Structure formats: structure tokens, C-alpha cells
Amino acid sequence: MEDFIKSNKKINIFIADNADDCRAEFIKFFENKNQFNIVGQTKDGNEALKAIKNNPVDILIMDVVLAGLDGFELLEKAKVDLGNKMPKVIITSSLSHNGFIDKALSLGVSYFMIKPIQLPSLERRITDILGLSESVPIPEQNFKNMRSKVIDEKISNVFITVGIPAHIKGYQFLREAIKLAIDKPEIINSITKRLYPSIADKFDTSSSKVERAIRHAIEVAWNRGKIENINNLFGIKVYNQNEKPTNGEFIALVADKMLMEGYGE
């Protein structure tokens, strides 16, 4: 949001978490950052709903487990009451079941982060959501490493959304393929001759194994019935249950989305 950059406006954060120690940890971290302002905190969902309705809140950091009103009920009621004035939401939770993640994403949550939370990562997610990443000074020597980590986290979030599990080999190959397509978009036109061999060299395997593993990863997502999540992710109805994309189509789709969101060089 340009408002924060042009006016040096502080980012208003409200924290809703059932765990006292988590709220205290988040507050201590953000209170030491000049860019942020903690406008309130609670363990009760009803109190959180009242607070974000009556106060200017840019980011709501919340757990699913809350007293009074659980996190999902809070989001459902807030969407009805606030409409387009709804703050951006990051869920931080130890509940990592696919059902919880799917539900959160369907309610418009920007990020679902699994506890324990790395606070610098949480800060990056906030600046990412508000379009402020470029306004945070990064030393030149650290920029490439920082950018790579941010891209890795973003791709991992996409994979969680579409249902690609981290333990299968195709997960790593597919992530590397998307990163290559972000850095060198033209490589998508030379998948067999350039993309697969590049990944194979990095992981000391063969191009054919790379191709099969990526195909398997995509098939797993489709077999899990995550099609609606994929369509929600890209904002349009891209596929249905009977339309599995080719490896190249899926890689290009994710890479193009990330390029449009400013993750290119």
C-alpha cells in the first residue's frame, strides 16, 4: 500500500491468540519496530471482532483457537460486517491439518503460518502482504539470499494451498523448476532441453526422473481434490477435476503469477 510508504504511516496490528506467551512474544517483537503499532491484543474471539470493527487495523495476526468465538467464526462474521474494510489476516497456528488450511484460505486469509513462528519471517509476510517489501532496506550482499528465501516461502505457501506434500521428491524438483522459470522465463519453452537437465544436474539425477517426479507431484494435488483451491489461488477458474495441466503449464502458471506479484529480478 502506497499510503505507508508516502506518509510513513505505521502499520496497525491487532493480535488474537489464546496463548498468553505467544501474544507477549509478538508484542515484544513488534513494539521494538518503528514501522509497527500494536493497537490491541486478546485471547477472546468476540473481543477481537469488536476491536477490528471499531479501530483501524491493517493486519490481524490470529490463531484458529480462541476463547468465546473461534478463529473461523471470527473471520466469517468480520467479512460480513466489514466487507472491503476487512484487515489483512495472517493465521499463526499449531493446527496444520489440510482442512484447517483450506478453510482459512477460503475465508481470504493471506498467509497460514505453522507455529513455532520465526518472527522475522512473520514481519516479512506483513510487508509482503502490504506491498512494502521493496521499501525495507536490504544490504546488497544479502539481497539475493533474502530474495531466494522469500520466493521459497511463497512457493511453499502455493504448494500447501494446492495440496502438494513436502515429503515427495517432485516437491523439490517442482520448486526448483518454478524458480528457474521466474529467473529465466524463456526457459519454459525449452523444458526438455534446458529446464529438466538443469534440475537434474543440481540434484544429481536424470532428466527423465525429474519429469516423472514433477508429474507425480501435480497428480497428487489433483487426486486430493484441491482444484477449487487452485482456482481461488489464481483468481479465475483455471481447471476442473478432469483437466490436469502438463508440467510446463503448471510451472508457467505459478511462475507467471509470482512475476506479476513482483518476485522477478
Image (tube, rainbow, N blue to C red):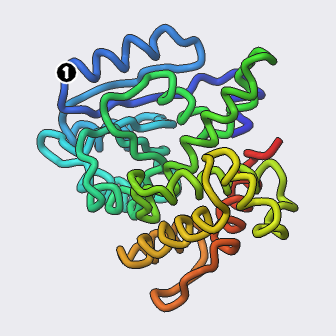
Amino acid type at mark 1: Asp
Question: Which picture quadrant has residue 209?
Answer: bottom right
Q: Quadrant of the C terminus?
A: top right
| Residue 135: image location, x then y, percent | 74, 26
In front: 243, or 108?
243
In front: 200, or 216?
200
In front: 173, or 95?
173
**Residue position marked by numbered label 1 in the rendering:** 20
Left or right, residue 203 beside residue 51: right
- Residue occupying the point 41% across, 64% down: 163
Is residue 263 shown above or below 105?
Answer: above
Is residue 84 shown above or below 91?
Answer: below
| Residue 261: image location, x then y, percent | 71, 51
| Residue 196: image location, x then y, percent | 71, 61
Label 1 secondary element? helix
Left or right, residue 257 beside residue 168: right
- Residue occupying the point 44% across, 77% down: 222
Counting other residues with Cα less than 10 Å from the Cα at mark 1, is it few (<14), some (14-19), or many (20 or more)?
A: few
Is residue 234 shown above or below 260?
Answer: below
| Residue 28: image location, x then y, percent | 38, 11
Q: Quadrant of the N terminus?
A: top right
- Residue occupying the point 45% across, 60% down: 161
